[in-house]
Amino acid sequence: MIKIYLYGHLKKIFDPNASLAENTIIEIPFKKNETFDGLIIRIGLNNHQIGDCFINGKYAQKTIEISDNSRIGIFPTGMRLIDGGLYIKLLN
């Protein structure tokens, strides 16, 4: 199973009643050999909707394969992380 944490206005796409103060998490079945790009398509989003994303706390590369039990954070385009997330991107 994969847990996907949604942030910003992406929450409303999957849960119209979502509160900005609460976590919005969707769980989907693991799919062997699926890349991050493939996962985005599978859940019905496109690259124009998403900004910075993380897989198990590391900056997500589009071609990385997703492993079972992954925790994925998806931020919308235009939602800025602290310092643009540069500190995280440099660590990965």
Image (spheres, grey):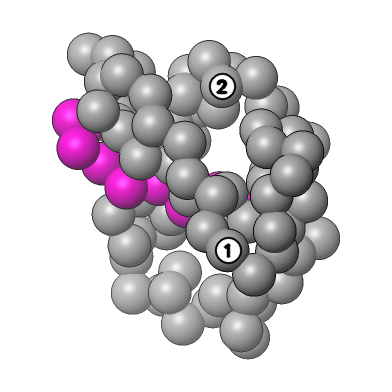
Q: Is 51 in front, or is 13?
A: 13
Which residue does the numbered mark 2 point to in the structure image? 43
Tell me if residue 3 is in the magenta stretch: no
Question: Label 1 is placed on what type of residue?
Answer: Glu
Percent across and percent down for residue 62 are: 48, 35
Tell me if residue 72 is in the magenta stretch: yes
Q: Is 10 in front, or is 66?
A: 10
Percent across and percent down for residue 60 are: 43, 49
Which residues are the magenta region? 67-76
Image quadrant in which you'd find residue 80: bottom right
Q: Main secondary structure of the magenta part?
A: strand
**SS state under label 2:** loop
- Image height check: is 33 above or below 69? above
Image quadrant containing the C terminus: bottom left
Tell me what residue is drawn at x 26 percent, y 20 percent.
30
Tell me what residue is drawn at x 54 percent, y 78 percent.
86
